Image (cartoon, rainbow, N blue to C red):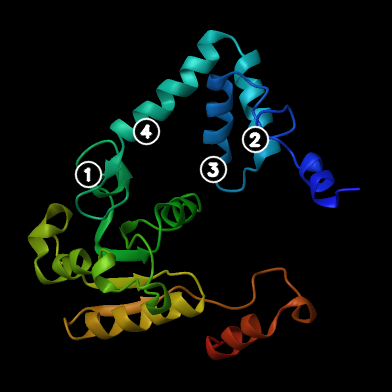
Amino acid sequence: MDRSRTRRSAEPNASSPGGGAARSAYPAAVERLIAEFARLPGVGRRSAERLAFYILKSDEATAMGLARAIHDVKKLVKHCRVCSNLSDDELCAVCADPRRDRTRVLVVEQPKDLIALEQTGMYRGLYHVLMGRLSPLDGIGAGDLTVDDLLRRIEKPEGNPGGTRVEEVILGLNPTVEGDGTSMYLAEQLKTRGVRVSRLARGLPTGSSLEFANRAVLADAIQGRQSME
């Protein structure tokens, strides 16, 4: 028997149903929608298919409402010219509010961090969004963030809402290696400009137990201990 001939006959043929690239069973428009959903963070192929079929089963008003919302968020939402928070105007709602304490600026990494702090209702100053944090390993330096914009707000009060001089900068970056490194860098830059620098408190949350706290939380609690006087 000719073994080479047998092997050749067993190989898939591009012109046969089993050969060539696999074709999708979905219409092209549906396959394109699935592919776009699958590009979203945390969305796999199966989840993308479920989302696509939800759109297919929805009435036209619901589907077009989603399409308009996506269009509007890309066309209308921009960054506040002062603090880089998300806004649909030149100034975000925080910077435009004359009732805020404009002598105090809380620095955060992302707009979502600002929103989380605002929801507490405990802070009435202004913010500054860095749009990231220093990460030399990833090639992210100070020039890739809004550090220069922050320093200009300190050096030139007219760049701050209401032309108010900033007296205190609160560092509210995430307690990670990169976040702490960014805080140290900012603290050095700010102190040379005569502004008071502080950071958000760390340590044991109210109602927690020592036995369930990790070493980093306990270390922060010891270092950030407060007097009982």
Distance, label 4 to label 1, CA atoms, is 16 Å
Which residue is depicted at the point 79% across and 39% down? 9
**Of callouts 3 and 1, the N-terminal one:** 3
Q: Is residue 122 above or below residue 72?
A: below
**Of callouts 1 and 2, the N-terminal one:** 2
Place residue 127 in its image quadrant. Answer: bottom left
Mark 3 sits on what residue?
Answer: 40
Distance, label 2 to label 3, CA atoms, is 29 Å
**Of callouts 4 and 2, the N-terminal one:** 2
In x, y percent, where is residue 187? 30, 82
In this view of the protein, which residue sits in the foreground, 50 or 212? 50
Total numbered circles: 4
- Secondary-structure class at tag 4: helix
Residue situated furthest front in the rendering: 1
Mark 1 sits on what residue?
Answer: 91
In x, y percent, where is residue 84? 28, 53
Q: Nearer the viewer, mark 1 or mark 2?
A: 2
Distance, label 3 to label 1, CA atoms, is 29 Å
In x, y percent, where is residue 121? 46, 52
**Pointer 3 local density, CA inside 10 Å: few below 14, some 14–19, many at least 20:** few
User: Disc number at residue 20?
Assistant: 2
Distance, label 4 to label 2, CA atoms, is 41 Å
Mark 4 sits on what residue?
Answer: 73
Q: Is residue 222 above or below residue 118?
A: below
Query: Could you tell me the amino acid type at mark 2?
Result: Gly
Query: Could you tell me the amino acid type at mark 3?
Result: Leu
In contact (CB < 8 Å): disc 4 and disc 3:
no
> Is 6 displayed left or right of 193 in the figure?
right
Query: Could you tell me the amino acid type at mark 1?
Result: Leu
Place residue 59 in its image quadrant. Answer: top right
**Of callouts 4 and 1, the N-terminal one:** 4
